[in-house]
Amino acid sequence: MIKTSLSATLVPAAVLLGLAAAHPAVAGPKEEVVAAVDKFLAAKSYHASMSMGPGAATETDFVAPDRMRVRLGAVGDQVLIGDTMYVTVQGKTRKQPAPGGGVAGTRSREKVLGNLQTLKVAALGSETLAGTATRKYKVENSQPNKTSSTFWVAADTGYPVQAVNVAEVGGKTYTSTLKYSRYNDPSIRIEAPAVK
């Protein structure tokens, strides 16, 4: 659910998950989560804000099928288009191959949820979050890394409103909070920056 290093900038695309119940009366929590992740991955666009403690949040925009812009605050910006990444730091932009297959390399059920065979999901009921009626889930996995996540999913649209992810990587525990908005917003556009 969460990765460190350069791939951490791709977390909002990979992690988290629109966890909505397509057929709550007939599906269990695990099936609901898998179906909702499929819906999340099918979104034409979205905005995500990720924080990992104090400091500025990382802002991410996605446009299908393979465009992502990651604003890392004072660190700089990254734009991924296909398998190419543009990195802008202190006003200078360089072009390089995107890590891990680029945006497409993060967009699958397994990249978002981990190993489906070891996935455990529990429904935690309903909750109002930031004025939005949501369904809440606890999602845990042990493969490929130990992860624990809580998701709040908008009851009316089935898209995620917020996700809190906890992962153990290399003996360290990382917690991230993601907030999602602007699903299928045609005004979100991502273009390659000029290399300078």
Image (spheres, rainbow, N blue to C red):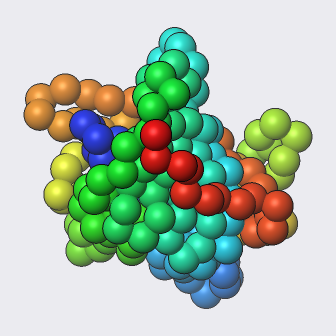
Residue 168 in the figure: left or right of residue 19: left
Residue 86 place in picture, x, y as percent: 42, 49
Q: Residue furthest front?
A: 196
Q: Residue furthest left?
A: 170
101 or 97: nearer the eye? Answer: 97
Q: What residue is rendered at 54% in x and 49% in y?
A: 194
- How many numbered marks, from 0 up? 0
137 or 46: nearer the eye? Answer: 46
170 or 62: nearer the eye? Answer: 62
Q: Quadrant of residue 162?
A: top right
Residue 185 in the figure: left or right of residue 69: right
Residue 112 place in picture, x, y as percent: 39, 62
Q: Residue furthest right?
A: 131
Above or below, comparing residue 6 to residue 97 in the picture? above
Residue 151 place in picture, x, y as percent: 57, 50
Q: What residue is rendered at 28% in x and 59% in y?
A: 97
Q: What residue is rendered at 61% in x and 59% in y?
A: 191
Can the viewer see residue 190 in this picture? yes
Residue 180 place in picture, x, y as percent: 67, 49
Q: Residue furthest top?
A: 54
185 or 136: nearer the eye? Answer: 185
Above or below, comparing residue 63 to residue 58 in the picture? below
Residue 145 in the figure: left or right of residue 28: left
Can the viewer see residue 69 in this picture? no
Q: What residue is rendered at 51% in x and 19% in y?
A: 74
